[in-house]
Image (cartoon, coloured by chain):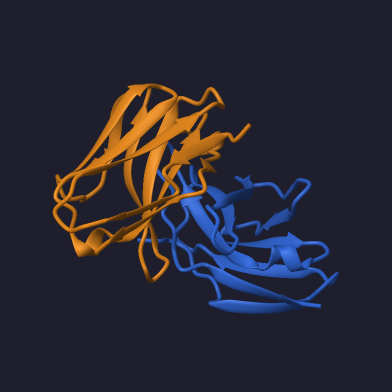
Chain colours: A orange, B blue
Amino acid sequence: DTAVSQTPKYLVTQMGNDKSIKCEQNLGHDTMYWYKQDSKKFLKIMFSYNNKELIINETVPNRFSPKSPDKAHLNLHINSLELGDSAVYFCASSLSTTGGKNIQYFGAGTRLSVL
Amino acid sequence: DAKTTQPNSMESNEEEPVHLPCNHSTISGTDYIHWYRQLPSQGPEYVIHGLTSNVNNRMASLAIAEDRKSSTLILHRATLRDAAVYYCILLWAGTALIFGKGTTLSVSS
């Protein structure tokens, strides 16, 4: 069983469209994250949820809206897609947010291409 | 911004040990030192972490300087599969991973 699974793996869409990426973890973790890796390979945190509550919200356009229906799921909805949104988006989860227990497990990524 | 400094790249031969250095001179007492790696076209993968003492696991060893201002990730016998970008990250309570540029490790057969 895949510990952290993201769907879809690839997403190709036109500018202006709205799309969603789903993430599920079966590790029983309390905290989930979304990271973005741009074309220069820089990985950056976008959001983090702990027990369905938003705890980290970096400077991200409000076109991006995370939603956590339960502890095991964290979805990312993107409105009005722009060319600059093209990137690989990684979901991750961890048991806790304390430094020693914050071991994060990542999904395989969703490669988003906006045309 | 990342609070660690790593060499951009390193090279190794297969089956030889690899020592990947990391400087973190501004580390605070509650910062844990985490190492992750990212293989080509994959998500980041946890390698090891520590606070003050040296740590060993099945993947690697982590040697932490006595003043905690630097650390070294040790791969005891590099394999081709270890070719990846290795990230040294300081992590404190309630935060997410802040990735820097990391060290790109190349392994030759």
The image position of residue A3, as x and y in percent, is: 58, 34
| Outermost right residue | B15
Residue B95 visible (yes or no): no
The image position of residue A17, as x and y in percent, is: 17, 49
Q: Is residue A17 left or right of residue B50?
A: left
Vertical side of A84 occupied by A57: above or below: above
Between A44 and A1, the one lying in front of the other is A1
Instruction: Determine which quarter of the picture holds residue A42.
Output: bottom left
Which quadrant is home to the C terminus of chain A?
bottom left
Instruction: Determine which quarter of the picture holds residue B74.
Output: bottom right
Vertical side of B90 occupied by A30: above or below: above
Between B30 and A87, the one lying in front of the other is A87
Q: Is residue B68 left or right of residue A34?
A: right
Which quadrant is home to the N terminus of chain A?
top right
Between A98 and A3, the one lying in front of the other is A3
Vertical side of A24 occupied by A106: above or below: below
Vertical side of A54 occupied by B76: above or below: below
Residue A65 visible (yes or no): yes
Between B63 and A114, the one lying in front of the other is A114
The image position of residue B48, as x and y in percent, is: 65, 48
Residue at 43 percent across and 30 percent down: it is A31
> What is the tally of numbered marks visible in this picture?
0
Residue at 36 percent across and 32 percent down: it is A74
The image position of residue B47, as x and y in percent, is: 65, 50
Residue at 57 percent across and 64 percent down: it is B40
Residue at 72 percent across and 69 percent down: it is B19
